[in-house]
Amino acid sequence: MDQKALLPDFVVIGAGKSGTTSLHEYLNQHPKIFMGDKEPNFFAYELLDPETLTDPTDKEHYFNSVYKLEDYLALFKEAKPDQLKGEVSNTYISNKDAWQRIKHYVPEAKLMAILRHPADRIFSRYFHLVRENEIPEGGDLNEVFNKESIWWRRPDLVNEGFYYRQLKPYFEHFDADQIKVFLYEDFIGKTDEVVKEAFQFLGVDPNVKVGTDVVYNKSGKVRNKSVDAIVGQESAPIRFLKKFAPGLHRQLKGSVTVNRWLNNVRNKNLEKPDFDPKLKQRIINEIYREDIENLQKLIKRDLKHWL
């Protein structure tokens, strides 16, 4: 088969902790859509040698990454001729090379993004790291204002929230009708409407009903560590499967039934932590205000409620 025929028709570029895992699962339920494994990160890391990743957290974080074109194309080989092919990689929104590779390989692809209030997103990321016991050295939340800290050095922390800076190259190098930006508050508040709008944007039947009652990859404070040790995303059984039976792990991860059950159990074991409103406002004022003001002009959405 022609290589071009195996490339994706659409790409969800981010942002992290903004509902993209749920969107991936909902899109995958449409009979005319085939989703490759989430987070292949190909357009961000093409030709990267994974052995150069010295941080164990990086190696684990990019577990599903593929670095060669043939491996990337293989993700879509099971797609039927009448299905659109898509993938979700949150690294694409912040990686400086991603938009260029997307433009090179799939210049006509449709692009989608979900944007969450940047302060809420970084708070959610923090509790995701807490949940997975992956807080990096120097990763105390109060260090977020220290530009020498890990919060600024890692691309998925403070920097991923500069949405205007991240999206500007996409709007400059792709036609506006190729890009669809959703807000996280709309996605969680009117999920069915947003999913229908996504289907319309992609050109598939928008009236197909999919199960949007389960939230995937939810962040929060763990209620019962014993339960999390058994079914958590970084629990011993999951780690064992990733290391010793990656094929079975991918098969189970691709099962709608298994995914729904696991995420329901995980979500019931999480509680929403309180975000100090003073800390949130300080993050807005000192880090993100200017970017938000520019972003609302770029995406033509009123974001005063983010300020």
Image (spheres, helix red, strand yellow):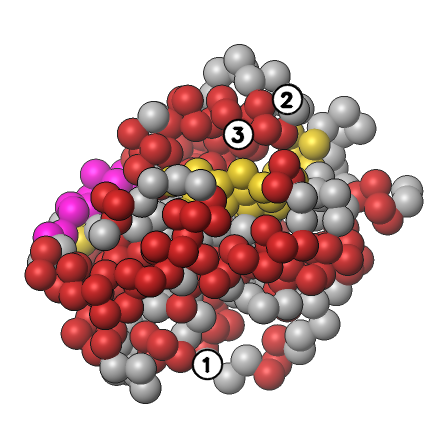
Q: In whole angstroms, how far apart are the C-alphas of marks 2 and 3?
A: 9 Å
Residue 66 vs residue 8, the one in the foreground: 8
At 52% across and 55% down in the image, what residue appears? 167
Q: Are marks 1 and 3 in contact (CB under 8 Å)?
A: no
Which one is closest to the eye, mark 2 or mark 1? 2
Circle 2 residues within 10 Å: few <14, some 14–19, many ≥20 = some
Q: Does the rendering let one see residue 239?
A: no
Residue pictured at 33% horizontal, 62% vertical: 290
Return the residue at label 2: 204
* Mark 3 nearby-residue class (10 Å; few <14, some 14–19, many ≥20): some
x and y, in percent, of residue 26 in the image: 48, 31
The amino acid pointed to by label 2 is: Val
Mark sitting earlier along the chain (2/1) = 1
- Could you tell me if residue 168 is visible in this image? yes
Q: Percent position (x, y) of residue 209? A: 48, 16
Magenta stretch: give its range.
265-274
**Residue 55 - label:** 1
